[in-house]
Image (tube, rainbow, N blue to C red):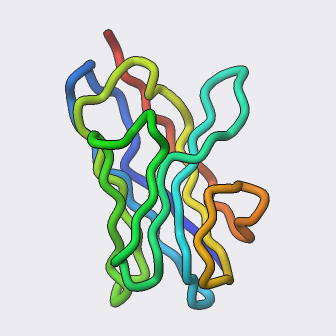
Amino acid sequence: VQLQASGGGLVQAGGSLRLSCAASGRTFYVMGWFRQAPGKERDFAAAISWSGSSTYYADSVKGRFTISRDNAKNTVYLEMKSLKPEDTAVYYCAARRSWRPSMDKAEFHYWGQGTQVTVSS
């Protein structure tokens, strides 16, 4: 079982980035993105159901980030727009074996290695 995140980088405030997370090894139902800024806990950013019909966002990213998935490619995406310096963090993709949505990192069973996103002011 492996989750491989990619797409991070350095961007100016107001810019955009698209993160990808390729999953392998099994079928994942709910998938999500979390982020961890230096010296802070890992926080929920977004999650998506198996069908993609239900999405969930932290208030801090709502309206700027969009999570989506392509089940044929077993890949989940996080489109990030209007980026702010406070979005700077390591972004981790995660997956649950359960159908039930969750925004609690303790309820995600698998984790990718993380990709750094840095937003300069």
* Residue occupying image coordinates x 67% and y 62%: 111
Q: Position of residue 38 (x, y in %)?
A: 65, 22
Would you identify the image quadrant in which residue 66 lies?
A: bottom left
For the N terminus, give its image quadrant: bottom right
Q: Residue furthest right?
A: 106
In this view, 89 is above or below 119: below
* Residue occupying image coordinates x 60% and y 27%: 37
Would you identify the image quadrant in which residue 52 lies?
A: bottom left
* Residue occupying image coordinates x 53% and y 69%: 31
Of residues 56 and 19, the one drawn nearer to the viewer in this rendering: 56
In this view, 104 is above or below 13: below
Of residues 3 and 70, the one drawn nearer to the viewer in this rendering: 70
Q: Position of residue 87 (x, y in %)?
A: 44, 28
Instruction: Tell me if 79 is positioned left or right of 20 in this view.
Output: left
In this view, 57 is above or below 50: above
Of residues 70 and 62, the one drawn nearer to the viewer in this rendering: 62
Instruction: Tell me if 42 is positioned left or right of 19 in this view.
Output: right
For the C terminus, give its image quadrant: top left
